[in-house]
Amino acid sequence: MATSTVFSYLPAIAILALLIFVHELGHFMAARLQGIHANRFSIGFGPILWKYQGPETEYALRALPLGGFVGFPDDDPDSTIPPDDPNLLKNRPVLDRAIVISAGVIANLIFAYLVLVVQVGTIGVAEGFNFGPGVLVPEVVSVDSPAARGGMKSGDIILTANGQKFKAAASDQEAKSEIESLQKVIQTNPNQPVQITVQRDDQTLDLTVTPKTGPDGKGQVGVRLAANGTPIFRAAKNPFEVLSLAARNFQNICLVTVEGFGKLITNFRETAGQVSGPVNIVRAGAKLASDSNSSGLFFYTALISINLAIINILPLPALDGGHLAFLLFEGVRGKPLPTRIQDGATQTGLMLLLGLGIFLIVRELIFQ
């Protein structure tokens, strides 16, 4: 990989590291503000690359940047804190512990909103687009889709399909019409090769894509389509507009993200191939960082922060939601689950999550 390519990924990697830091800082501050002991604050997993020992807490950067953790001395055999100390996390009431566990998710949500506030306040409010020729492919939804098998990639601009050219639109309505024209070519040619010309960076490529037949009998290639345009911005009129528009954008991202997780659960077979792992997440961030307009990078930061929050709140062992489920069970039952059950479930969940992460990394490095 060329050095310039490596450096192009650094902004995206830095954003992911920042979001992990924000998440873990939420846990850490929620503990400290309640007087709860916390003896480790780590970004990453595995071998320690750098550490600093504070009066009570060890701060560290570790080799595998796939997450982070805040450590508590409750079960640390080297801790000198008495096991009956009221400021150990395990000795605090259920509500205090729930605040600490949920604080990472809350921190990511607050941070996402603040990012959107900065976006609207500095870049402005979008008002229309400057359109270019062709139809943009923001996403190829699966490595097994007809588009992917035909060589199409996310970010391509489709210039022609079966000889039909797609011109630069003069309005939103014309842009919609160009997208519909492309969709018609695809839908009317199920199981028939479609000759497509795309623009990819500075190259013009000729591809052959064969749409598969969808449930409705129409052709499908497995891509999202959008107008090929760059947004035009105006300055916000007042602080209220900044805050309200940021709130609306925040709400929209949350709704779309929850809807996406819902589809993954209810229609796993069709949507599993759309799941992005660390490699594709970094690639998307690197592409946005290379664009002259930084609006997309703000959106990317808020989107990943919200996704990180929602993933962590899922009631799965090893995630914050799993620990909250244990606390809920304790609150209803009146006593916690046996330690061996909690530890076993957490370790199993952690191994499954790490396995999924490794699988996604390998899939994206080899097949994309």
Image (cartoon, rainbow, N blue to C red):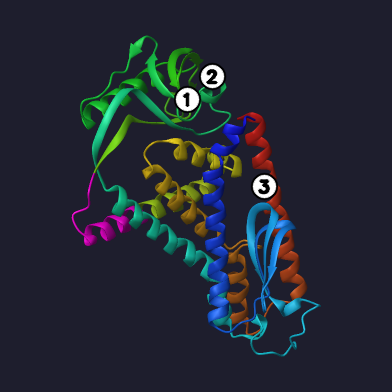
- Rendered image: mark on residue 256: none
- Distance CA(mark 2)–CA(mark 1): 9 Å
**For the point 51% across and 48% down, which residue is it?**
266
Q: Which residue is mark 2?
A: 150
Q: Nearer the viewer, residue 345 or 175?
A: 175
Decide which of tag 3 and tag 2 comes sooner along the chain.
2
Stretch of the chain drawn in magenta:
234-251
Label 2 crowd bin: few (<14), some (14–19), many (20+), radius 10 Å: some
Decide which of tag 3 and tag 1 comes sooner along the chain.
1
Label 3 secondary element? helix
Q: Which residue is mark 1?
A: 221
Q: Residue furthest right?
A: 77
Q: Nearer the viewer, residue 166 or 272?
A: 166
**Camera-side mark, 2 or 1:** 2
**For the point 51% across and 39% down, which residue is it?**
286
Q: Nearer the viewer, residue 67 or 363?
A: 67
Position of the N terminus by quadrant? top right
Q: Residue furthest left?
A: 237
Please name the predominant secondary structure of the magenta segment in the image: helix
